[in-house]
Amino acid sequence: MSIIPTKKLVFRVFRFNAETDYLPTYINYELEVTHEEVILDILNRIKWDIDGSLSYRRSCRHGICGICSIKVGGKAVLACKENVFQLVETFGEELLIEPLSTKR
Ligand code: FES
């Protein structure tokens, strides 16, 4: 029997509803994460298990289409390709998740 290593991490997620919010907010979600999960897995778990109002884009899940592009800790990444444990090595155990900036 093997034990899969996990870490308890905080995902600080950008939230904004144009119909009800004047300003964006950030909500913290605390999850137990395994070494094989990517950011898209985390977004799916938040949406499916915690908060169904979370919206994000995904399609191919193979790093081809680019539709899942998102910022983690200010760095643009593909949510379906970026391993959570590798991001923790760079940004620590609280990961900031935001949409891509529209500013150039
Ligand atoms: S879902 Fe297509 S690149 Fe991530």
Image (cartoon, rainbow, N blue to C red):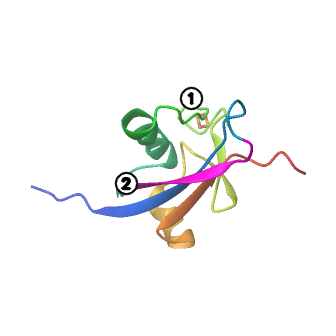
Residue 38 image position (x, y, % from top left): 47, 49
**Amino acid type, label 2:** Leu
Residue 12 image position (x, y, % from top left): 54, 57
Q: Secondary structure at mark 2?
A: strand
At 47% from the left and 57% from the top, the residue drawn is 84
| In front of the other: 48 or 79 | 48
At 49% from the left and 42% from the top, the residue drawn is 43
Q: Is residue 13 magenta?
A: no
Above or below residue 90? Residue 20 is above
Question: Between marks 2 and 1, how big is the CA–CA gap?
Answer: 25 Å
Above or below residue 46? Residue 96 is below
Q: Look at mark 2 in the image and give the residue it sits on.
A: 31
| In front of the other: 60 or 91 | 91
Q: Secondary structure at mark 1?
A: loop
Q: Is residue 24 magenta?
A: yes
Q: Is mark 1 within 8 Å of ligand 1?
A: yes
| In front of the other: 88 or 61 | 88
Image quadrant where residue 60 sits: top right
At 27% from the left and 62% from the top, the residue drawn is 5
**Amino acid type, label 1:** Cys
Q: Quadrant of the N terminus?
A: bottom left
In terms of image quarters, where does ligand 1 lie?
Answer: top right
At 40% from the left and 33% from the top, the residue drawn is 48
Image quadrant where residue 34 sits: bottom left
Above or below residue 60? Residue 70 is below
Q: Which residues are magenta?
A: 22-31
What is the crowding at mark 1: few (fewer than 14 residues within 10 Å), some, or many (at least 20)?
Answer: few
The main secondary structure of the magenta stretch is strand
Residue 9 image position (x, y, % from top left): 41, 62
Disc number placed over residue 60 in the picture, else none: 1
